[in-house]
Image (tube, rainbow, N blue to C red):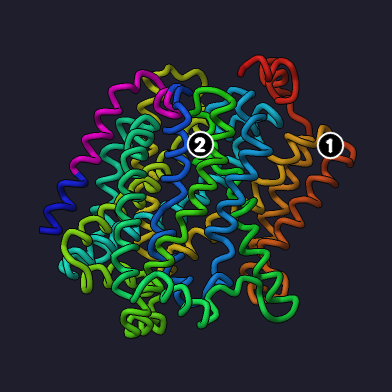
Amino acid sequence: MLIGFTLLYLAVTIGIGLYAARRVHNARDFLVAGKSLPLYINMATVFATWFGAETVLSVSATFARDGLNGIPADPFGATCALIFFALFFARLLYRMDLLTIGDFYRKRYGKSVEVLTSVTITASYLGWTSAQLTALGLVFTVLSQDAVTLNQGILIGAGVVLVYTIWGGMWSVAFTDMFQTVIIVIGLLIVATLVGEMAGGAQVVVSRAAADGRFEFLPKGGLAQWLAFIAAWATLAIGSIPQQDVFQRIMSAKNEKVAVQGSLLGGLAYFAFAFVPMFIAYAAIVIDGNYATLFASEDAREVQRILPDLILQKVPLWAQALFFGALLSAILSTASGALLAPTALFTENVLKPFMGPVGDRRFLVMLRVVLVLFTCAALAFALNSRSTMYEMVQNAYKVTLVGALVPLAAGLFWPRASVQGALLSILAGLIAWLVCERNFADATVPPQLVGLAAAVAGMIVGSLAPQLYTERRSHADHLAADPHSATGAQRK
């Protein structure tokens, strides 16, 4: 019965995605939904894209094990990222009339920085996308009572997401996100109410969590603990700002005002609702302490089974259908965006600059081919990883924190930022981070903070030093490079 419901839900989702694909007439429709989404859909896409597998399964389980101190990155850092983007970046980037975030680097710095940052950001999506595919695999494994292995489930999930994303692009993502947001909110609230009553009431769950120290947020210890805490928060809070999926939703808004409000309201809604699965996960421990044994598993991914196991073993069928409908909604909405974002970036800003003039029809074909190839790459990553989804997501954003954030922020807010400074920033940040990650991972200062400091130093030194490397830009790109200008403002 539950399997039948799941198959019906997947069929409906694919149907909505394919229906939305009828609106795709050109690459602009495929990438940013024609820049026409109203506030309620734009907000839903921000919320649904952020509210993914790691929020429901991994963040909740990590909270049950470690408390708030164990999750500074998500939801705290993730929420800050959306708020920071809304307040400081959304308006300026929207005025520049861009298709991808890679277009910003081209207009501000030139082709070399465009390609280098786009490759860096695209690579970061392997971990983010793999986390969603791993979650889909886990759901299918649990629902089939292990008749479907985790790896088989990952393959099935990837196929489902690919089917509707490859045809409808951002239009399919927007329509399915709207549908999935409704399912997430209704489903998880009802399940949380039911599970809370099984545990003796919400007050009992909250009091038990408080007594067990799960609401202690700030780190205990010395400098090393504080730096690790700050690094985890910063990885998502600022490392996820130069990401194509957030950018894509902002650019899909129908105007500048909606772009800002959609990101801000979506972020606030995400923060409020992220605590619902945490409540359910801790209620599971209150109901049956045996679930805590999953914390000791050698495979870190096993802890993510707390919620699925609780639902299958303790609640009636109708509640199981609601929970897994909400869970699939959370995963599918994030997975589709996680596939589309790097596809758009790599095709537009890595392939296209080396191919000369490309017609719109041919560009759409290129987008769909790259989408398939990136899905295969994410599959390979997911099938070979043993990290939790929470860890996968954090690792993904370390790349953009050290390799793309500084050129973006400096390009918008520091007029003296130069091509030479941007290139030195990217290379210094990535090299310093990789060296420290490989050789000094347990040092007092986390590797990503070392990489970020190197990126800042590279931008300052490279921009203020004599310019040994410059790059000519087209006249149109030069005019569009300043979002503060009247030229940029007229594009609203």
First to last magenta residue range: 11-33
Is residue 103 at least partly visible in the picture?
yes
Residue that carries the numbered disc 1 in the rendered image: 468
Decide if residue 409 is on the left or right side of residue 200. Answer: right
Query: Which residue is more in the foreground, 302 or 115?
Result: 302
The amino acid at mark 1 is Leu
Quadrant that contains the C terminus: top right
Is residue 54 at least partly visible in the picture?
no
Name which residue lies at 45% across and 45% down.
47
The amino acid at mark 2 is Leu
Query: Which residue is more in the foreground, 253 or 416?
Result: 253
- Quadrant of res 486: top right
Name which residue lies at 54% across and 29% down.
258
Instruction: Give SS at disc 1.
Output: loop
- Residue 264 drawn in magenta: no
Mark 2 residue crowding within 10 angstroms, few (<14) / some (14–19) / many (20+): many
Query: Which residue is more in the foreground, 471 or 421?
Result: 421
Counting residues from the N terminus, which is met first, the one under dot 2 or under dot 1?
Answer: 2
Quadrant that contains the N terminus: bottom left
Decide if residue 274 is on the left or right side of residue 471. Answer: left
